C-alpha cells in the first residue's frame, strides 16, 4: 500500500508493507501550495514514481493536515492549504485507478502507532502531537475515534485558560495558543519586546525579532539560556494541564507524545509524565503510561497506508482493524 503525508508545503510518501515497514520511499517533494490542482499534480507524480520498476500499488492512503470526510474522500477544511470542500480522494482514485482513503494526519499517525508501534494489544491509546499546531488521536476499544464529522482529536483547542490568549480558531485560551510552535514564537517575541536585555541571546541567535521562533527558543532552552528556559518551562506547565485533562477524559492505557516541539525540547515529555502521575484522577493515573511515539515522521505515512489496507480487508462501514485481544501489555 502507498501512504502519503500531505502538509502545507511538503509531500512525504512511501510504500508500506503489511508489517508497517516502509519498503520504498519517494523523494521528499515541496509543493507550491498553488491550489488543489497543482497539489494534485505533485501527488500524482509521487504515486506514479513509486509505482515504477514493477512495484505494485493496490491502494493509497493520504494523511492530510485537515478535517476530512473519509467516507466521501473530501477535504472539508485545511487551513494551512487554504482548502474547503475539495474532493481530493475522488480525483486521485480516478487518475490512479485504485481505491483512495483520506484521513487526518494526526489520526493517521495515531493509527500507525497503534498498529505498528508495539501497541496493538492496547485497547485504549491516546496520541498528543505538538508541532506548529497541536493535534491528537484516540484509539478507543480498538477503534479509531472519528466523531460526528470526523473532527475528533482536536485537543489543541481544549481551553486551558478561560478568556486567555487568542487562538487561530474562534476561541481564546486554547492549549495550542500556549504550546503550539507558532504560539511559542509569539510568546518569545512578546518577551523580547518587553525585556530585550534578558532576551538578548534569543534575538542574537534568531538574527532579529521577526525571525525569533520556536526552533530558536527550544535550542537555547536546551542550552539553559535563562529566558528561553523560562519560556519552555511555562510551556511545559500548560502542556501538562492539557495532558492531565486528556487522561481524565479518555482514560487511555498509553499517552504517546510526538511532534517537532517535543523533539526540540524532550524535557516536555518528562514534565507531562510527572504531572499526569501527580494530578490526574488516581485510577486514570495508575492505568496510563506516558511515552514517546515510535514511528516519528513516518507515522502519518505508515498510518495512512495501514488505514486503507484495513479498510479493504474489513470491507465494513467503519474499516477498523480487528479489536484488540488479550490483556494489556503494561
Image (cartoon, rainbow, N blue to C red):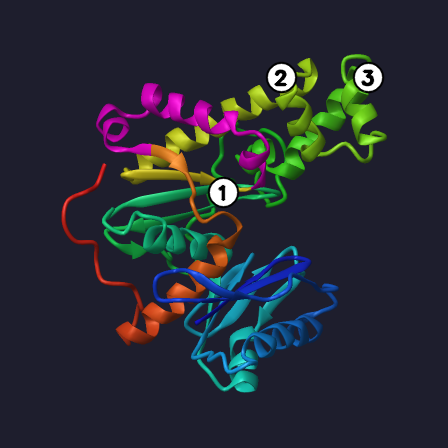
The answer to whether the residues at label 3 and label 1 have Cβ atoms under 8 Å apart is no
Q: In which quadrant of the rendered view does residue 37 lie?
A: bottom right
Vertical order, 185 against 109 (above or below): above
Return the residue nearer the eye: 324 or 167. 324
Query: Alpha-carbon neighbours of circle 2 within 10 Å: few (<14), some, or many (≥20)?
Result: some
Q: Position of residue 55 (x, y in %)?
A: 49, 79
SS at circle 3: loop
Q: Position of residue 171 (x, y in %)?
A: 57, 40
Residue at mark 1? 129
How many numbered callouts?
3
Return the residue nearer the eye: 251 or 119. 119
Q: Main secondary structure of the magenta part?
A: helix
Residue range highlighted in magenta: 260-289
Checking the image for residue 230, the label placed there is 2
- Determine the residue positioned at 52% across, 71% down: 74
Return the residue nearer the eye: 275 or 312. 312
Which of the two discs, 2 and 3, labels the residue nearer the N terminus?
3
Return the residue nearer the eye: 244 or 326. 326
Vertical order, 236 against 148 (above or below): above
Q: Position of residue 4 (x, y in %)?
A: 53, 65
Residue 302 relative to residue 145: left or right:
right
Residue at mark 3? 196
Which of the two discs, 3 and 1, labels the residue nearer the N terminus?
1
Between the residue at mark 1 and the residue at mark 2, the CA separation in whole angstroms equals: 22 Å
- Determine the residue positioned at 83% across, 29% down: 209
Amino acid at each position: 500500500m502507498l501512504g502519503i503525508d500531505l502538509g502545507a508545503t511538503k509531500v512525504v510518501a512511501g510504500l508500506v508493507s503489511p508489517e508497517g515497514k516502509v519498503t520504498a520511499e519517494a523523494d521528499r517533494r515541496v509543493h507550491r501550495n498553488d491550489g488543489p490542482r497543482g497539489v494534485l499534480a505533485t501527488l500524482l507524480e509521487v504515486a506514479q514514481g513509486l509505482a515504477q520498476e514493477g512495484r505494485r500499488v493496490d491502494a493509497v492512503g493520504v494523511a492530510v493536515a485537515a478535517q476530512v470526510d473519509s467516507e466521501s474522500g473530501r477535504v472539508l477544511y485545511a487551513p494551512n492549504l487554504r482548502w474547503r470542500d475539495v474532493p481530493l480522494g475522488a480525483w486521485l482514485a480516478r487518475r490512479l485507478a485504485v481505491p483512495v482513503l483520506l484521513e487526518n494526519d494526526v489520526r493517521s499517525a495515531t493509527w500507525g502507532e497503534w498498529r505498528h508501534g508495539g501497541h496493538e494489544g492496547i485497547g485504549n491509546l491516546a496520541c498528543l502531537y505538538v508541532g506548529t499546531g497541536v493535534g491528537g488521536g484516540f484509539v478507543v476499544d480498538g477503534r479509531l475515534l472519528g466523531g460526528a464529522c470526523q473532527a475528533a482529536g482536536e485537543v489543541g483547542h481544549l481551553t486551558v485558560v478561560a478568556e486567555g490568549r487568542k487562538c487561530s480558531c474562534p476561541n481564546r485560551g486554547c492549549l495550542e495558543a500556549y504550546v503550539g510552535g507558532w504560539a511559542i514564537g509569539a510568546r518569545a517575541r512578546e518577551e523580547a519586546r518587553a525585556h530585550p536585555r534578558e532576551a538578548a541571546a534569543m534575538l542574537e541567535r534568531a538574527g532579529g525579532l521577526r525571525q525569533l521562533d520556536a526552533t530558536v527558543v527550544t535550542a537555547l532552552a536546551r542550552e539553559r539560556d535563562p529566558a528561553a528556559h523560562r519560556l519552555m518551562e511555562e510551556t511545559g506547565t500548560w502542556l501538562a494541564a492539557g495532558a492531565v485533562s486528556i487522561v481524565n477524559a479518555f482514560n487511555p492505557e498509553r499517552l504517546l507524545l510526538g511532534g517537532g516541539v517535543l523533539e526540540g525540547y524532550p524535557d516536555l515529555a518528562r514534565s507531562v509524565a510527572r504531572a499526569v502521575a501527580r494530578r490526574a484522577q488516581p485510577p486514570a493515573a495508575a492505568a496510563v503510561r506516558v511515552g514517546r511515539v515510535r514511528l516519528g515522521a513516518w507515522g502519518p505515512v505508515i498510518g495512512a497506508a495501514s488505514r486503507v489496507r484495513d479498510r479493504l480487508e474489513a470491507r465494513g462501514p467503519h474499516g477498523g482493524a480487528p479489536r484488540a485481544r488479550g490483556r494489556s501489555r503494561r
